[in-house]
Amino acid sequence: MSDKFKFAFRVAISLTLAYMIPMALGWAQPSTAATTVMLIASTGSRRESMAKGTLRVLGTIAGGIIGLLLVGFFAQDRLLYMLAVSLVVVIVFYIRSAYLNDPTLFMLTGVMILMMYNGGDAEGAFLYGIDRTFMTVFGVVVYTLVGVFLFPPKVEQNLRQLGDDLTAAQKALFEAMSLPPQTEQPADPPELLEEEAEPPEPEVEKEATTLVELSKSLFAAQQAFEARYQALNSECSEVSAYKKEWDGTVALYSQITDLLLFAAKDHTRSGGHPVEYLRDFDVRRTEVLKLFDRLPDAWEKQTAHSPQTMDPIEYDAERLKQAGHLYRGEAISSGYLFNQLRERLSKLESCISSIDSLTGTVDFELPPLKAKPNFNWWDAENAKSAIKVFVTYWVAGAFWIQFNPPGGYNFVIFSTLFVSILSFLPFHPVMLFILFTLGFVFSVPAYVFLLPQLTLGAELALFIFIYTFVGFYVLKGPVTIFFLLGMFTLGIDNNMVYHFGITLTIVTLFYMTVLSVVVSYYLPFSSRPEHLLLVFRERFFRHATGVIRLLQVDKLSLWQKVQLVWRITTMVVALKKMQVWGGKFKADHYPSFTAEQLNGYIAQCDLFHHHLMTFIKARKKLDENPLLVQAKKGNRDTVIPALAQALWQVELAKGDGLNAEHLKQDYQDLEARLDKYFSHLELEKYSNSDIAGFYIFLNLKKNIFESLLSCKQVSDEVVWEELSMKRF
C-alpha cells in the first residue's frame, strides 16, 4: 500500500467515524465534526501525533471562548460585532499563515470564532456555540486517534533512510571533487584517432557540470533530512528519547555538508591537484570514503563507541616551498578538508551508534543544533492574505445583510474561511468550479436514488467512506475541499428530510462561496502566476543584492544584523514560491516565452541561492580570518553586487549594456589584485586554517559570481515583458 493509499484510507475512516458516532449517539450537528476532519486533512501534514492533536483541541477551545466572548459583548450591535470579529479573525489567520509548523492549530481557532455567531440570533447563542465547540473537538480527537494508531509511520526508519541518502550524496560529491587526474591511456590505433579524438575542453565542462549537479543534490538531501527531523522533533515524537544524540547527528551531518560545499570546485580552476602535494593522498582519500561507507551500518549497532583516531595529514614540504602560492593554498586547503572530514565523520559514526544504545552515550562534546524559527513574520503574501480575508468578510457580510442569500450567515463564514485557506495557492480558479460541480454530479444521483434506499448504518458508512476515499486518493491539498463539499450538500442526519429544494439551496450557497474565492483570486491582490513570477523574481534578487552588500560590511550594527536576517529569510521564501508557481505556469498564451526557459532560469536561481547560503554559513569564521580582514580592506568587490542588481532591475540592466565579457574581465582584475596581495605575504606567520580559509573564501566568491553570471545569461534570453502584458 502506497503512502497516498494509507493517507486516503485514514482520512476516510476518520470522516466516517466523525459522522456515524454522533449520529449513533443522537448528538446534534454531526456535519461539524466531519467538516473539521475535512479541513485538517486538507490543510495539515500527513503525520499525526497526540501532542499535535492536543494543541488542536486547545486551539479549538480558545477559539470557542473568544467567539463566545465577542458574541456576549457585541450581540446587540451587529455591525460592531462584525468589526470586532473581522479584526480578530484577520490577526488569527495572519498568524496561521506565518506559522511554519502545523497551520491547523490557528485555523481551528479562527473557524471557531467565525462559527460562534448564530446567524444574528443572540438567543440561544451560548448553547449553539457550546455544541459547535464540542463537535469540533470531537472531530479533532477522532482524526488524531485514527492517525496515531492506524498505519503509524516508522519515524526512525524514515529518518535513517533520509540519513543514508544524505550520506550517499556527501560521498558522491567528495569522490568526484577529490578524484586524481586521469593517467595517460595507451595510444589508440591510428584508425580510431580521427573518429574519437576530442579536445580536452568538453571533458572539463562535463566535470564542472557534474560537480554542480552533485552539489545541488547534496544541498537538497541536507534540506530534506533537516526538514524531516524538525517536523518530527516539534511533535515530541519517538526521537525525544535520544534527543541529544539526534541533535548531534543532525548538526554533524550539517557540518560535513558545509565542509564539502565550501571546497567543491573543479581543480582546473586553480591549475593544480592536491595529489601532487599531500603524502599518501590515495590512502587518505580511501580512509574518508570508508568512513562514509560505515555510516549506514552504524544505525544497526546497539553499542556506543568512541571516535576512531587516525594519522595526521602530511604535506610534501620540499615541493610546497618551490610551488607558487596558488598551488600551496590548494594543498593546504585540501589537507584541512581531509582532516576536518575524518574528524567529523568519525564523531558522526560514534553519535549514530549511540542512538537506541543501552551501553552509554557519546564521550565528547556534541555541536549545538541551530533552532529553526517557528514563524515567518516578514512574508508579504501573508499580509496580503490577511487583507483579502478582511475585504472578503465585509463584502460577503454586506451581501448577507442586503440580500439574505441561501445559507444566511454561513455564506460569510465559508467565504472568509476558504479565502484564507486558498489565498496565493497555485491553482486556477476555474478548477474550483470543476471540482465542486464534479462533487455535485456525484452527490445528486446519490441523493435521489441511493440515500433513500439505505436502511442500515453500515450502508451509509460505506457510502461516506468511498466518497471520502476517492476525493483524497485522486486529489491532494486544499482543493480537495471543493470535491468533498458535494457530500455536505446531502444534509446527512438521523432525520433525513428529502426535499430537492433544500439541496439546491445548499448547492447555491457553496457556488456563491466558490465565486467569492474566485473574485479574491484577482482582487484586491492578483494571484495570477505571470504576475507573481515577476514579483518573486524581483523580490528574490532585490533581497539577494541587499544580502551581498551587507556581507561586505566589516562590522554590522544591530539594525544591519536584523536587516540581514530579514533579507535572507525573504530571499529564501521568494525562491521557494518562484519554484512552486513556476511549476504551475502555463506558457501557451505567450509566443516568445517557453516553460523550458522559465525552468532553466529558476534552476540557475536555485544554484545561485545554494552558493550564497553556503557563503553565509562560512561568514562567521571568514570574518575572523586575519588574512581576509587585511585583504578586504584594499580590495572591495563591486562586480558581484552590480551583477546581482542587474538581475533585480532587468529592464535597466539591458539598457546599460552590462555584458558577460565585461563582467568576467572586471572579476579577473579583482582576483589578480588578491593574488598579488597574497604573493607578498610571509605565509609561515599564518596557520594552515587561516590559509585554507582564504582559498575557501576565493572559491565561494567564484562560485557565487559564476552562478550569477549564468542567471544573467539565462535571464537575457527570457522575454519578461510578455508576462506584464494583458491577455485581453
Image: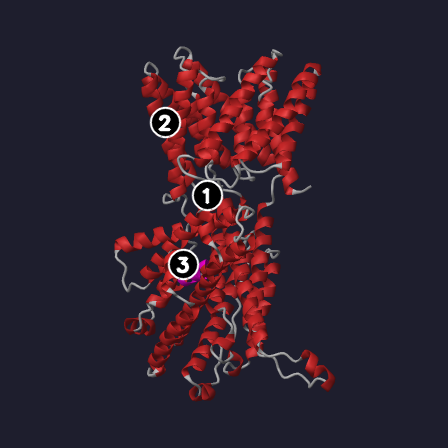
User: Of helix, strand and loop, which one carries label 2?
Assistant: helix
Residue drawn where x is 54% and y is 17% of the image: 505
Dot 1, how many residues are within 10 Å of its Cα: few (below 14), some (14-19), or many (20+)? few
| Relative side of 474 to 525, left or right | right
First in residue order: circle 2 vs circle 3: 2
Res. 690 visible in picture: no
Q: Nearer the viewer, residue 63 or 197?
A: 197
The residue identified by callout 3 is: 647
- 106 or 22, nearer to the observer: 106
Q: Secondary structure at mark 1?
A: loop
Q: CA distance from mark 1 to mark 3?
A: 24 Å
Is-magenta flag for residue 613? Answer: yes
Residue designated by label 2: 86
- In three-dimensional space, the C-alpha distance between marks 2 and 1, rounded to whole angstroms, equals 34 Å
Give, as a three-letter code, the residue at label 2.
Ser
Q: Which residue is mark 1?
A: 726
Residue at image point 32% right, 74% down: 631
Q: Residue at x 67, y 42 (%)?
A: 2
Q: Which residues are magenta?
A: 609-616
Q: Is residue 497 above or below residue 271?
A: above
Residue type marked 1? Lys
Q: With respect to residue 14, does 639 lie above or below? A: below
